[in-house]
Amino acid sequence: MTPATAHMPIAPICRVVLFAFLVAVLSPPAVAQERLIPNLSPKAEERVLFVAGNTLFSLHHETAHALIDQLDLPVLGREEDAADAYATLAMLPEPPTPLADALLLAAADGWLFYAETAPIDQLAYIDAHPLDEQRFYRTACLIVGSDIEGFFDYGLDVGLTVERIEECPALWQDTRRGWERLLAPHRRAGNPPAASLFPATWSDPPAQLSHEIGFLRSSGLVANATRKTSDAYTMPQPVMVQFRDCGEPAAFYDPDTPSITLCYELLAEFGNLFDQAVGVE
């Protein structure tokens, strides 16, 4: 599975967090700032940000699997935990921006949405992935740890205890330091490659995803993410990034190709998850 959620834009005073729509889980502050996607209604904008945030998290998560495979990186513990951590780090740029915060909070909330809609059975306990609730709270703690002052209230609102919140900066520092040390020997010293080592291709999307795909492409979010990774590390070979129909909701890295695939069915599932959680406009 992959995560999801959307948030309204906010002006970054330190890092003021905006929770926009998840009334049942978050208590939204009374701050309405400039719109991030002004040509859409507020709820349509939230839906687009929800899908975009979860799509980017999925892209970074699968990129982590690609880096682990292509660069032969050691992993202590579950690789899925390491990939989630990499995705969270990648989606918290410095300096922070309202859009970046909104997209990452959306991705974190997605795990909570999944947890509320997907029943837990025995297979969930033996799966390579942690439980959706665990993925949410670990991601939330990393977010809080990246800026405890700016995200302290967010941590309380999503159910982290004060004691856990105080531990989050150490989790953030350890996680960031671990990934930085693993990737340091592979950092590019010279000029970036002329062509991206993570080239993205898009097949024709379904009509229901026109706003979401349009935003992901026109905003440059996917292109910037793949180019940043390509410019940062020396890769033994390119890794193709494909957005296409798959017949099922999925995102995966294929080491044989090598390629990362994000299925349109998964993006549609993110949209449906949003609709179930907050209602259809």
Image (cartoon, rainbow, N blue to C red):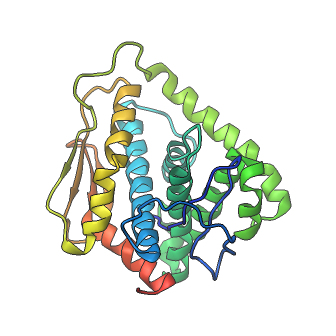
Residue found at x 56% / y 30%: 180
**Can you name the residue that lies furthest to the right here?**
163
Does the image show residue 49?
Answer: yes
Relative vertical location of residue 124 with respect to residue 154 in this rendering, above or below: below
Residue found at x 54% / y 66%: 7
Q: How many marks?
A: 0
Which quadrant is the C terminus positioned in?
bottom left
Task: Please state the horizontal and vertical placement of residue 153, each as a whole percent of the image.
Answer: 76, 62
Quarter of the image holding residue 137?
bottom right
Quarter of the image holding residue 269?
bottom left
Residue found at x 27% / y 70%: 209
Relative vertical location of residue 226 with respect to residue 129 in this rendering, above or below: above
Which quadrant is the N terminus positioned in?
bottom left
Name the foreground residue: 223 vs 247. 223
Task: Please state the horizontal and vertical placement of residue 240, each as a whole percent of the image.
Answer: 23, 42
Task: Please state the horizontal and vertical placement of residue 216, each as a whole percent of the image.
Answer: 33, 55
User: On the rendered structure, is 222 left or right of 24?
Assistant: left
Relative vertical location of residue 163 with respect to residue 30 in this rendering, above or below: above
